[in-house]
C-alpha cells in the first residue's frame, strides 16, 4: 500500500471527513483490520483564511509548498490536498516536489464524464466558483459547468465559512442549499458538484433531483485506488 500524504486543516471539518472516509474505504476493499497508510499535516485554517481574504495567495502558496515538501520528506508516495479552494495554488504548492498530486477537480471531472453527464452545477466557495482555476480544469475535461447567481454564490460562501467550517449545520442553511441546487437544475444543470469539501455536510443525493458528485468522497475513492494500484 502506498503512503498517502494529506495536506489538510483547511478546514479541520473537511479533513476529519477525509480521514473517516479513507479508513472506511480501506476496510471495505481490504477487509479485516486494514486501514490506510497516511501522513497528515493539518494547518491552522485561521491563518490560511486570513491570507485568502487579504489576497495574499503567494504567501499562502509558500506555506503549502513548505508543508508539501515536508510530507515528501516524511515518505508520502503521492499527495492529496484536502480542500477544493486551495487547489488554486496547486502549481506553486508542487514546485520542486518530486511526488505527484492527485488533483480533486480531475478526479471529479472523470467521475462526471463516466456517467455521460456534461453540465454540472457547482456549489463551492466564492473563490472556487468565481475564479477560473477550477472551472477551467472542468472545461478542459469537456464539461460545461454552471455556477449560481451572485446572491446564491454569496449565500453558499457565507454558510461554508461561518457555519460548516465550524461544524455547524442548521435546517435553515440546508433549506437554502437545497433551493440553490434546484435553481441550478432549473437553469439546465444535469448534475451537481459539491465543490467544497464541507458542502456534503448539508447536501447529498437524497436532497437533489440530479446526480450529485461529492468531491470529498470522489477524491478519497481515487486516493485509495491509487494507493492500492
Image: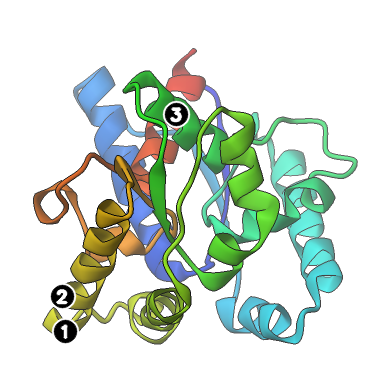
The image position of residue 72, as x and y in percent, is 74, 40
The image position of residue 24, as x and y in percent, is 25, 38
Q: Residue at x 26, y 81 (%)?
A: 168
Q: Residue furthest front?
A: 187
Q: Is residue 198 above or below residue 21?
A: below
Instruction: Check the image and tell me how it is coloured.
Output: rainbow
Q: Please give the residue where the numbered disc 3 appears in the rendered image.
A: 222
Q: From the viewer's perspective, tell me whether residue 175 is left or right of residue 127.
A: left
Q: Residue at x 28, y 58 (%)?
A: 200
Q: Residue at x 42, y 65 (%)?
A: 148
Q: CA distance from mark 2 to mark 3?
A: 30 Å
Q: Residue furthest right?
A: 96
Mark closer to the observer (1, 3): 1
Q: CA distance from mark 1 to mark 2?
A: 5 Å
Residue 1 seen: no
> Of label 1 and label 3, which has the lower sequence position?
1
Q: For residue 88, what is the image quadrant?
A: bottom right
The image position of residue 140, as x and y in percent, is 64, 32
Q: From the viewer's perspective, tell me whether residue 7 is left or right of residue 224.
A: right
Q: Please give the residue where the numbered disc 1 appears in the rendered image.
A: 172
Q: Please give the residue where the numbered disc 2 appears in the rendered image.
A: 175
Disc 3 element? helix
The image position of residue 66, as x and y in percent, is 81, 57
Amino acid at each position: 500500500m502506498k503512503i498517502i500524504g494529506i495536506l489538510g486543516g483547511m478546514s479541520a471539518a473537511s479533513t476529519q471527513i477525509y480521514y473517516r472516509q479513507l479508513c472506511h474505504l480501506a476496510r471495505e476493499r481490504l477487509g479485516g483490520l486494514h486501514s490506510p497508510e497516511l501522513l497528515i499535516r493539518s494547518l491552522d485554517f485561521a491563518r490560511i483564511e486570513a491570507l485568502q481574504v487579504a489576497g495574499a495567495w503567494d504567501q499562502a502558496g509558500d506555506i503549502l509548498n513548505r508543508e508539501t515538501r515536508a510530507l515528501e520528506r516524511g515518505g508520502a508516495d503521492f499527495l492529496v490536498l484536502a480542500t477544493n479552494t486551495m487547489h488554486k495554488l496547486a502549481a506553486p504548492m508542487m514546485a520542486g516536489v518530486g511526488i505527484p498530486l492527485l488533483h480533486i477537480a480531475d478526479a471529479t471531472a472523470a467521475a462526471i464524464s463516466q456517467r455521460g453527464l456534461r453540465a454540472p452545477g457547482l456549489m463551492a466557495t466564492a473563490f472556487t466558483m468565481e475564479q477560473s482555476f477550477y472551472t477551467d480544469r472542468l472545461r478542459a475535461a469537456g464539461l460545461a459547468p454552471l455556477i449560481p447567481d451572485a446572491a446564491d454564490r454569496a449565500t453558499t460562501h457565507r454558510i461554508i465559512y461561518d457555519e460548516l467550517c465550524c461544524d455547524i449545520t442548521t435546517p435553515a442553511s440546508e433549506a437554502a442549499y437545497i433551493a440553490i441546487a434546484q435553481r441550478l437544475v432549473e437553469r439546465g444543470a444535469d448534475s451537481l458538484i459539491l465543490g467544497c469539501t464541507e458542502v456534503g455536510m448539508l447536501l447529498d443525493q437524497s436532497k437533489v433531483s440530479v446526480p450529485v458528485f461529492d468531491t470529498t468522497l470522489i477524491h478519497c475513492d481515487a486516493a485509495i485506488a491509487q494507493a492500492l494500484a
